């Protein structure tokens, strides 16, 4: 039963109790539900203070007969009813009183005296060393009403484009931080009473306990309304008990499926060609590699969206489902309660899918099942936690063993990171020192001839310049990709033709085959002015 059903049931109970009370008292009962939201308000009979004080509302006036109708409650003093009846009679008027429920009185008073909408200041992210902003935001959060503080925090995080909200316990206070463009920024320091309000709302809406002594996971759907438009946020909640209380991390996922588009991911032409090749012949295993927050899910969903045509059946297995995409069958796998990706994958293969996405390959059983599915005509997409494509490939071999049958199963591995993008309107070019030039030349040594590289003896780099539009000199993020295409030479490691299987050897072979490493791709992005070397070193 949802919240609206519960409220309707409570109202039914209140009205029935009021009807019985009216019968006992010998007064007329009135159910106002049919007209309470749109009846004309009579404001010149009683003022707001008199309505609240007497628990009484004017309902109607018949000017011809000079008859006034009032709604009273069981808490309305009888002396007040008698006084009003007498006063109206003395002036040639008639007052009729009807017993209405407490729910009806509260609903009508919300129309007579609507709550005043409070506009709070928007949250600003503090720059390095800027303590004044931190203090001001903390004051704002402390002043937001208890019923609004959680929604305010979520709405502001969405306005800032934050991917995460961190609620962290310290000895004497609570720290709120938000991750914007991949970097964590302090937002506010709160008193514990605000923390209790936020956590109580979080627990209620995510179905978790504030008294738990173990980590918990939950999910919230939150509607955002701004500037005449609206969208749905999916919040993934993780809590963990710490020394001073429960810390919480809220990950924000925007349900805007129109953004899940390969054309919007700022992928280079060569990288896009390899992905398009996979999409044009959907079979085999494609893996996205990287840590949490590297954009793996967005890229996988974008590939799924490109494959999402009426002639294909697409099924996903996810823990949890992060984005709902029309036309795709999405199955949640709750691994915390013992469900396994491998079991789910075996089940969905009986449904004759064309494309299957497995949220994550975590064990050898899932790896083997995914490989077996991929060699029987299915395209299997999955994510994998590893630092690079070569590391992921060697770990997959460790999981499933060297096997000639599986050698053609794995088609493409994509390692990805997200780096902050320089704000084009303010970024500043500069000449790097000779040590930096030497390092860049070393990193880019051996690149394929097809890669467009500037003159490495005379190139410029770029640095961020802060503006009002980009307080840190960056705006948004761009993906940095490393794509390991499983060629005949790479397949030898999986077949067993090469005995010494390790990440270094696989990477060296892949580079000879034309692979651009993550670090090389990052440095090339810095040379193009998309980001900085500092950002590349921070992330990669």
Image (spheres, helix red, strand yellow):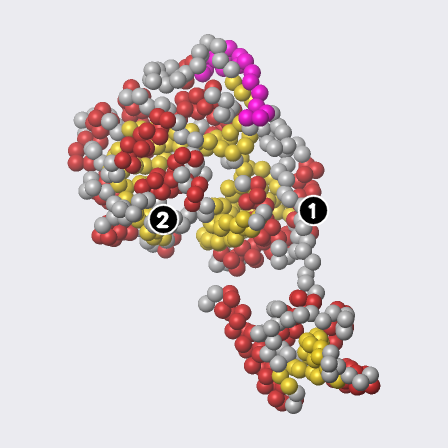
Q: Nearer the viewer, residue 271 or 332?
A: 271
- Per the image, is 275 magenta? no
Task: State which quarter of the image contains the C terminus.
Answer: top left
| Neighbour tally class for label 2: few under 14, some 14-19, many 20 plus, Cα within 10 Å | many
How far across and how far down the image is residue 243, in percent? 55, 48
- Circles 2 and 1 in contact, beta carbons < 8 Å: no
Q: Position of residue 517 (x, y in %)?
A: 37, 24
Position of residue 29 measured from the top left corner of the image (x, y, whole percent): 62, 83
Q: Which residue is mark 2?
A: 318
Disc 2, SS: strand
Q: Residue furthest right?
A: 90
Residue 31 visible in the picture: yes
Which residue is painted at 56% across and 81% down in the image?
16
Q: At 51% from the left edge and 69% from the top edge, which residue is drawn? A: 6
Residue sitting nearer the eye, 297 or 83: 83
Q: CA distance from mark 2 to mark 1?
A: 40 Å
Sequence order check, earlier mark of 2 and 1: 1
Q: Position of residue 526 (x, y in %)?
A: 48, 22
For image coordinates 38% across by 40% down, the residue present is 302
- For the point 19% across and 42% down, which residue is it? 376
- Front in this rendered view, residue 476 or 273: 273
Magenta run includes residue 427: yes
Residue 263's label in the rendered image is none
Q: Which residues are magenta?
A: 424-440
Q: Is residue 417 left or right of residue 405?
A: right
Residue 175 versus residue 522 in the image, above or below: below
Q: Which residue is mark 1?
A: 139
Residue 117 figure quarter: bottom right
Q: Eyeballing the image, is 116 above or below 281?
A: below
Q: Secondary structure at mark 1?
A: helix
Q: Residues within 10 Å of mark 1 (few under 14, many from 20)?
A: some
């Amino acid at each position: 039963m949802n919240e609206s059903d519960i409220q309707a049931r409570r109202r039914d109970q209140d009205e029935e109790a009021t009807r019985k009370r009216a019968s006992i008292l010998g007064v007329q009962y009135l159910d106002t539900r049919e007209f309470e939201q749109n009846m004309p308000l009579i404001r010149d009979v009683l003022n707001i203070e008199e309505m609240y004080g007497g628990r009484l509302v004017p309902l109607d006036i018949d000017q011809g007969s000079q008859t006034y109708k009032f709604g009273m409650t069981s808490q309305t003093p009888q002396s007040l009813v008698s006084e009003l009846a007498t006063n109206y009679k003395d002036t040639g008027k008639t007052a009729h009183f009807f017993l209405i429920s407490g729910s009806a009185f509260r609903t009508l008073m919300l129309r007579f005296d609507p709550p005043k909408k409070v506009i709070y200041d928007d949250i600003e992210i503090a720059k390095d060393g800027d303590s004044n902003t931190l203090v001001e935001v903390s004051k704002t959060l402390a002043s937001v009403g208890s019923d609004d503080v959680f929604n305010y925090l979520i709405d502001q995080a969405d306005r800032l484009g934050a991917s995460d909200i961190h609620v962290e316990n310290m000895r004497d206070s609570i720290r709120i931080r938000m991750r914007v463009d991949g970097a964590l920024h302090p937002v506010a320091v709160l008193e514990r009473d605000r923390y209790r309000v936020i956590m109580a709302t979080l627990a209620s809406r995510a179905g978790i306990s504030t008294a738990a002594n173990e980590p918990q996971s939950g999910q919230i759907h939150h509607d955002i309304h701004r500037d005449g438009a609206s969208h749905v946020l999916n919040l993934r909640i993780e809590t963990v008990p710490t020394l001073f209380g429960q810390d919480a991390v809220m990950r924000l996922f925007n349900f805007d499926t129109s953004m899940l588009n390969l054309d919007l991911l700022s992928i280079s032409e060569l990288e896009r060609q390899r992905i398009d090749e996979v999409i044009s012949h959907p079979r085999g295993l494609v893996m996205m590699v990287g840590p949490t927050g590297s954009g793996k899910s967005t890229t996988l969903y974008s590939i799924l969206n490109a494959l999402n045509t009426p002639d294909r059946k697409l099924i996903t297995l996810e823990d949890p489902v992060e984005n709902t995409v029309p036309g795709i069958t999405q199955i949640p796998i709750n691994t915390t309660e013992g469900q396994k990706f491998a079991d789910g994958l075996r089940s969905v293969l009986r449904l004759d899918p064309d494309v299957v996405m497995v949220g994550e390959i975590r064990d050898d059983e899932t790896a083997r099942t995914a490989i077996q599915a991929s060699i029987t005509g299915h395209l299997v997409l999955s994510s994998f936690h590893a630092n690079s494509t070569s590391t992921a490939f060697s770990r997959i071999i460790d999981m499933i063993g060297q096997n000639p049958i599986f050698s053609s199963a794995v088609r493409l591995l994509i390692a990805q990171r997200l780096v902050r993008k320089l704000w084009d309107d303010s970024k500043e070019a500069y000449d790097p020192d000779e040590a930096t030039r030497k390092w860049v030349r070393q990193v880019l040594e051996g690149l394929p001839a097809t890669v467009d590289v500037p003159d490495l003896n005379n190139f410029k780099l770029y640095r961020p310049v802060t503006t009002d539009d980009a307080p840190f000199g960056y705006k948004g993020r761009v993906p940095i990709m490393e794509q390991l295409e499983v060629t005949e030479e790479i397949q030898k490691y999986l077949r067993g033709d090469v005995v010494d299987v390790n990440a270094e050897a696989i990477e060296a072979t892949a580079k000879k085959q034309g692979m651009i490493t993550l670090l090389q791709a990052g440095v090339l992005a810095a040379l193009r002015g998309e980001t900085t070397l500092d950002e590349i070193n921070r992330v990669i």
